[in-house]
Amino acid sequence: MSFTLRVLAGLILGLAIGIGISVARVPWLLPVPGLVEPLGILFVNLIRMTVIPLVVSSLIVGVASMRDARAVGRLGIRSLVLFLVALGAATVFAAATAYPLLGRLAIDPAVAARLRESAAGAGRTAAESAKQLPSLAQWVTDLVPVNVFKAAADGAILPLIVFALAFGIALTAIDRERRQAVVRVFHGIADSMLLLVGWILRFTPVGVFALAVPLGARMGVAAAGSLVYYIVLLSGVSAAFIIIVVVPAGVLLGRVPIGRFVRASAPATAVAFSSRSSLAALPATIEAARTALALPEEIASFFLPLAASMFRVGGAICQMVAVLFVARLYGVDLAVSQMATVIVTVVLTSFTIPGIPAGAIIVMAPVLASVGVPVEGIGILMGVDTIPDMFRTTANVVGWLAAGSILARTSRKVEETGELRAGVR
């Protein structure tokens, strides 16, 4: 049995047992959810243990290596700017479409209260939570951590990201030999965390089962309906972003005829949708850029590999929708300042999503914690990630080709402007 099937089997079996316990109400079965739940919490804690070192070290390595990217000219800087704009658009699009639709998802307040009480570290009332929400001024001042290690201990991911970006930029200004020594250390940390995450993910079927049993016991039949709603919603938002935003952007801003763009992207999207792997679709994407779209060689040889490692609009959509869903599931209302924190953090952490199954969900753990949403929900989301992953991987690949087309056109425009100015002089 494949890994995906084992995870789905763990989810279905856990929900079935939990729902059965909820319906049967047999006295000797009622303690079962409480007995298996610690295994699920342990699984989530193992994932959370790796996320902060992975995110911080990956960001530092990426920023500190920007000097190498500048060797290929202004293309590297324009690429990073385009990444930020596209990821911001994807995150805002996901929030704007998913938030009202999740309002239609009926969650019994009593069920949400039971879920909050069961979450590790939960137990605060809504009033207590509201009192602790930061003002806009406090949110801005908290972006710069007074104590980096305290921020790490508190799981404050956004201040840590600010520190990692600043530290990486500072590294680019020191001597090359000393910079490389520091970067090698953080590169080793990032690689080690990825390896550790791979080991932890082997226990995903057990962790998902242990989380699904208490979820089914507390929500009853509504648990299955809520997860189906999440699958359809996330898949639909990803597909809508491709159709409404990505393809028109490639056609209008990249000046590529729509028929040509669709035909060029078809082979790569087929690989992406079927394999659920952006990296697996990279060769087909490069071939489409070189032949079908006739993009400049620097787009195929530099931009697309860079995009494959850093640019994942599908991951940004996934994180945004997943945060809103888990918040809805647990009955947590997000204030304006919290929504701003989620959007900014999702955009920045999207650069650090590892190329492993459910990578976007794993990196989401500190995002949930930063706004007071229980992180236990990520284990369940990993169990139903197969279908949404197909759509968001497709969004990644189509986004690469659209961004490459836009970048090629803007690069030609910049060169023409420079030549014109040189002629005038």
Image: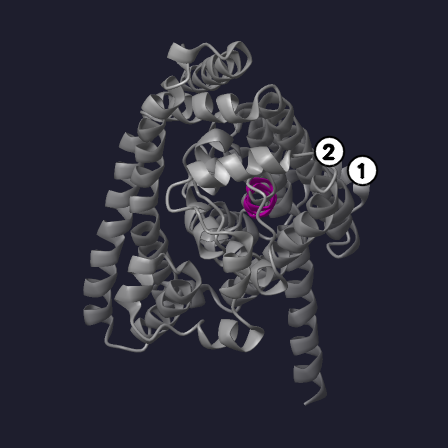
Say whether residue 299 is left or right of residue 48. Answer: right
Q: Which residue is mark 1?
A: 259
Question: Magenta region: which residues?
Answer: 316-326
Res 290 visible? no
Is residue 278 depicted above or below 21 in this figure? Answer: below
Labelled disc at residue 349: none
Q: Secondary structure at mark 1?
A: helix
Say whether residue 131 is left or right of residue 191. Answer: right
Count neighbours of disc 2 (C-alpha within 10 A) and say few if under 14, some if 14 to 19, many if 20 or more.
few
Q: Which residue is mark 2?
A: 263
Q: Residue at x 49, y 68 (%)?
A: 73
The percent coordinates of residue 87 (x first, y second) are: 59, 55
Of 183 and 52, nearer the camera is 52
Res 340 visible? yes
Q: Amino acid at mark 2?
A: Arg
Q: Determine contact: label 2, label 1, CB under 8 Å.
A: yes
Within the magenta stretch, is there residue 335?
no
Of 17 and 311, nearer the camera is 17
Is residue 295 depicted above or below 179 in this figure? Answer: above
Within the magenta stretch, is there residue 323?
yes
The percent coordinates of residue 264 (x first, y second) are: 69, 36
Q: Residue at x 67, y 64 (%)?
A: 410
Is residue 137 depicted above or below 411 in this figure? Answer: below
Count neighbours of disc 1 (C-alpha within 10 A) and say few if under 14, some if 14 to 19, many if 20 or more.
few
Q: Secondary structure at mark 2?
A: helix
Q: Amino acid at mark 1?
A: Gly
Q: Residue at x 73, y 54 (%)?
A: 254
Q: Main secondary structure of the magenta part?
A: helix
Q: In the figure, residue 325 lies in which quadrant?
A: top right
Q: How is the image coloured?
A: one colour
Say whether residue 137 is left or right of residue 270. Answer: left
